[in-house]
Image: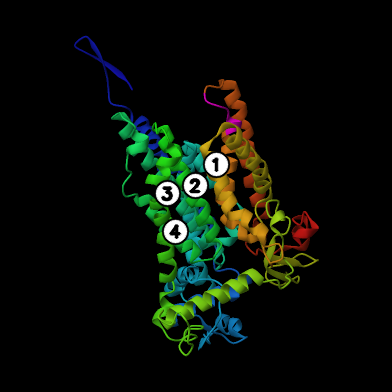
Amino acid sequence: MTQAVVGGTVVEEAAAPEVRARSWVLRRADWLGPLAVALFAGLLRFWDLGSPNAFVFDETYYPKDAWSLLRQGYEGTWPDNANEQILAVPQVVPLGPAPEFVAHPPVGKWVISLGEWAYGLHPFGWRVAVALLGTLTVLMLARIGRRLLGSTLLGCVAALLLAVDGLQFVMSRVGLLDGVLMFFVLAAFGCLLGDRDHARGLLAAARAEGGRAGDDVRLGLRPWRLAAGLLLGLACATKWNGLPVLAAFGLLTVLWDQAGRRWAGAHRPWRSMLRRDALPAFLSLVGVAVVVYPLSWAGWFLTDGGYDRQWADDRSSVVSWIPASVRSWWHYQDQMREFNTGLSTPHTYQSGAWSWLVQARPVSMYWQQVPEGQQGCTAPGGCASQILALGTPLLWWTACFALLYVLWRWFFRRDWRSGAVLCAVAGIYLPWFLFQDRTTFSFYMVVLVPFLCLAVAQLLGGVLGPPGCSAERRRWGAAAAGLLVLAIVGCFAFFYPLYTAEVIPMTSWQDRMWFVSWI
């Protein structure tokens, strides 16, 4: 601001344009920062999205199922050479009307089908919707991190870490279901966080009026929690991995209610929570999810050609009063349960849950050995083109320490933010230890990545220094945190060729195989 003398009085003139612009940016940093990180993530994820022009790993299933849903309302059959015919020029789409058994519910495939509806049955078409959700997940995490950690900077750091995680990057660029599941789970977490703040606001207003607000106040309709129930229902209708998350988040929200009532002065916060909040929470989450899940099968119910659609038509039963279509559907669900719990077919890239946090056995989703002189390869020893579902190693290894840090903060400091992250980790990760004999893969943990990034961001917040620390302590903390973030970004850049099927010399590929188990 500049000053002028008017009538012997010093007055301030209008701020210079650059000062006003700086003030405008600072006032809107809570959105500009997240949008900038999301734009960066989107550019990475959409760049050359249609490459490779191939079916990558389980893309041999889900994009074709999505196309079948779009055309028939249910999953049909495909001949053995369908992939070659789809990629051929001119294209042939050999979809048959006979039903096909599928192991997962339909919502994720309906999401994939949106891209196919817009762009056709091509690699870009079956990847674009997942890439969009992967980008939106980065934006959501920035906002969620800001609300959870109380810092726009830390929220944007968490989002930046997610943007440069190799596993999230790869799973946002392939037409698989896990990236869709990640989006719904994180969105539900964000809604529950908004519900917590909304409930605290109501309790604070009631406490300000006096009385035993924590015991008596009714919190009324809670739209954020209803939205969380809808999203968790969609998560379960994408993959059944969403079921333990639903249970974990249900426990989390009622514990937040109990803590809120204690904070508001309730004499018996547990009893108040059980009387006022437990049943509404159950109905808002589990009740809504139970409605959403069968509705997601509308295509199967509204057509006659789906797998097991007429299974119960000619079968008598003690529950014959239940419509045959519902009994057939329930039988189908039981077959899916048997398949998903009993899958034990050996696979080259399978791994146990104990190894996932350290990325001991990443999944090679695409591999091509390129001779010299082809596809731009000039290396005498030939080249390699690979898509490796490997989380950025330095980020994941840092996250292992970050989880110990948030566990310490939750146990010894009773930090609710750390408890929220740990609850999500428990709901996503721990159930997999119950399936030691099942064929499992490390890329399932893409759902966990946003919460690992929140844990690392909280750790970096601790490195920056507590409120009131000296300026020198803050400078050293900022330098250490900044160097770690830059190192993680550099690590992602180093492995980037392995995430995008870039043709690189075989020697360069070998330089990136840090462990034998990565090959």
SS of the residue under disc 4: helix
Residue 368: percent from left, percent from top: 71, 71
Residue for badge 2: 252
Residue for badge 1: 419
Q: Is residue 356 left or right of residue 181?
A: right
Distance CA(mark 3)–CA(mark 1):
19 Å
Q: Earlier in the sequence, mark 4 or mark 3?
A: 3
Region of the chain picked out in magenta, as a range: 462-467
**Relative to residue 252, is residue 91 depicted above or below?**
below
Residue 309: percent from left, percent from top: 47, 84
Q: Nearer the viewer, mark 1 or mark 4?
A: 4
Residue 286's label in the rendered image is 4
Quarter of the rendering occupied by the N terminus: top left
Task: Tell me, yes or no, whether the highlighted magenta stretch contains residue 463.
Answer: yes
Crowding at label 2, few (<14), some or many (≥20) Cα neighbours within 10 Å?
Answer: some
- Residue under the point 52% across and 25% down: 467
Distance CA(mark 2)–CA(mark 3):
11 Å
- Residue under the point 58% across and 45% down: 422
Residue that extends furthest to the bottom in the rendered view of this protein: 314
Distance CA(mark 1)–CA(mark 2):
9 Å
Residue 339's label in the rendered image is none
Count the numbered circles shown: 4
Q: Viewer-proximal residue, 443 or 157? A: 443
Q: Viewer-proximal residue, 65 or 324? A: 324
Q: Amino acid at mark 3?
A: Ala
The answer to whether the residues at label 1 and label 2 have Cβ atoms under 8 Å apart is yes
Q: Earlier in the sequence, mark 4 or mark 2?
A: 2
Residue 278's label in the rendered image is 3
**Relative to residue 347, is residue 271 depicted above or below?**
above
Q: Earlier in the sequence, mark 2 or mark 3?
A: 2
Quarter of the rendering occupied by the C terminus: bottom right
Q: Amino acid at mark 1?
A: Gly
